[in-house]
Amino acid sequence: MTENHQDSGRPNTGIVFLVGAGPGDPSLITVKGLECIRTADVIVYDYLASPRFIQEAREDAELIYVGKKGKDHTCEQDEINDILVRKAREGKKVVRLKGGDPYVFGRGAEEAEQLVASGIPFEMVPGVTSAVAAPAYAGIPVTHREHASMVTFITGHEDPTKEETAIDWEVLARNPGTLVFLMGVRNLNTISESLIKQGRSPGTPAALVRWGTTPAQQSLFSTLARIPEDASRAGIKPPAVLVVGSVTSLHEKLNWFEQKPLFGKRILITRSRKQSRGLAEKIASLGGEPVLFPTIEIKPPEDTGPMDRAIQEIGSYDWIIFTSVNGVELFLKRFLELREDIRDLSGPRIGAIGPVTAATILSHGIKVDLLAKEFVAEGLLAQFTTDQVKGKRFLIPRAETAREVLPEQIAKMGGTVDVVPVYRACLPDASDIDHAKELLRTKAIDAVTFTSSSTVNHFVEMLGPEDLGRLLEDVVIASIGPITSQTIREKGLTSTVEAAEYTTDGLVSGLAGVFLKRRG
Ligand code: SAH
């Protein structure tokens, strides 16, 4: 749906925001840049812009991919300009998203000039250029009081042997500061030779950083003379920056990013898309790359009758026990639909299994009277005496299918239990099973995380049990707790690691432990 800006009081011409999207790590974006992405009608992006930004877009935003790797894109540039002008003339808020900074070898200025010429308003939102960020993530500061008091950004795209070069190699060779070449991977030989020929020492420390700031980052440290050969041996391809100067030697001390426990690891998240975010952020913060493969989609129960009745009679319960975040969210949503006033919930006491479930309840302004010390059903029961249960009425709003331990035990202790389904964990309507299989088959996934028994069951159902052993060979299987591990075993698999605390934090710590140990 297109927003007509006339309605919002704006004139009916759109606007183009040229937004720098950081060189890879999606958290490297300005607050303004992110705000632009979240509110855009149209996003025009290229291949260096992280796909994670696209997830921030409005669901109805139009996404136009115009990126192309390497080589010149002169003809496409006209098309890109046309698209920007056309969409803006339709009255839309257009974001032109570019990797790094739009004005640093990004042709952003040419697009801006075209907009000005067409009378389209534009704003420029600077980004973090790879010329600074990629070295920084490889432990290289581009300046340092004892190493370099200046830094020069150079396009390495130019053929230095051509006669009319815009690059003065003699001046560069004499330049006492740091040199950062972008787009230089294919010209490493000529860059190195030209600088040495003009008098730069062959032993000058030099480094290449490929896919800087991303989990796929690769760095290579060498000298000006040797780096072309070392790079070809290491198979370094674009995109990479070449840094020449003694600052590169600081990486030994300052290499913080590549030392993160999950650095370079691709980790599959199988929980519902909506709930994946927190886990994905935790994985990324430890240097890993989260890959979403939701095996669950949360839907309302088929029959809302029992839930609705429980809500109508809410005052007759002594306890409500929540066992999951989804249970809390869907129950409260329905509660407010039917009762309209949260104060109607004041009678029963509230129990929760798991700190995240408790936090979700609290986030609705509701106090938790009892939190299970062990984050499984048994943990909660251990905290009740028979006297506290006998003759009391319990409501357990939860998934349509779930473990029976809790209701059975409460009944045994003399309580009355109403178990009402408030949601169903269904297979997702749409999912890219082939893509997930391909990633597993090519060993592009290092670990799979399971955060509940249903994620295990659905994962096996979606991928098919036949190939599973082979697909998961050498893949770390991480389980959130004993119940999930048991389901994993029932499927003939073995979990490599089980969270010590049964939360996603515990899960990620467990994973980090496995990979740190392997690294030795
Ligand atoms: N406007 C971009 C640069 C675009 S030119 C910026 O400011 O970063 C494309 C070149 O940028 C690539 O050839 C490579 O040299 C560099 N580059 C972009 N992203 C990179 C990354 N994540 N790691 C290393 N180099 C990168």
Image: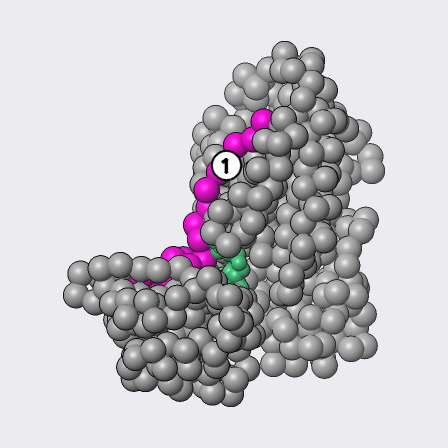
Residue at mark 1: 124
Quadrant occupied by the N terminus: top right
User: Which of the 4 quarters of the picture holds residue 449?
Assistant: bottom right
SS of the residue under disc 1: strand
Start-end of magenta stretch: 121-142
In the image, is 313 to the left or to the right of 224? right
Does any portion of residue 207 appear in the rendered image? yes
x%, y% of residue 469? 72, 79
Q: Disc 1 marks which amino acid?
A: Met
Q: In x, y percent, where is residue 171? A: 32, 67
Residue in the image at 54% along x and 16% along y: 343
Give left or right: position of 421 versus 382: right
The residue shown at (60%, 42%) is: 111
Figure quadrant of residue 512:
bottom left
The residue nearer to you, when weighing 290 against 270, is 290
Looking at the image, residue 19 sits to the left or right of residue 244; the answer is: right
What residue do we see at 69% from left, 70% from top? 439
- Foreground of the two, 55 or 327: 55
Tell me where residue 119 appears, x and y as whole percent.
Answer: 63, 26
Q: Is residue 132 magenta?
A: yes
Q: How many marks?
A: 1
Percent position of residue 107, x then y:
56, 49
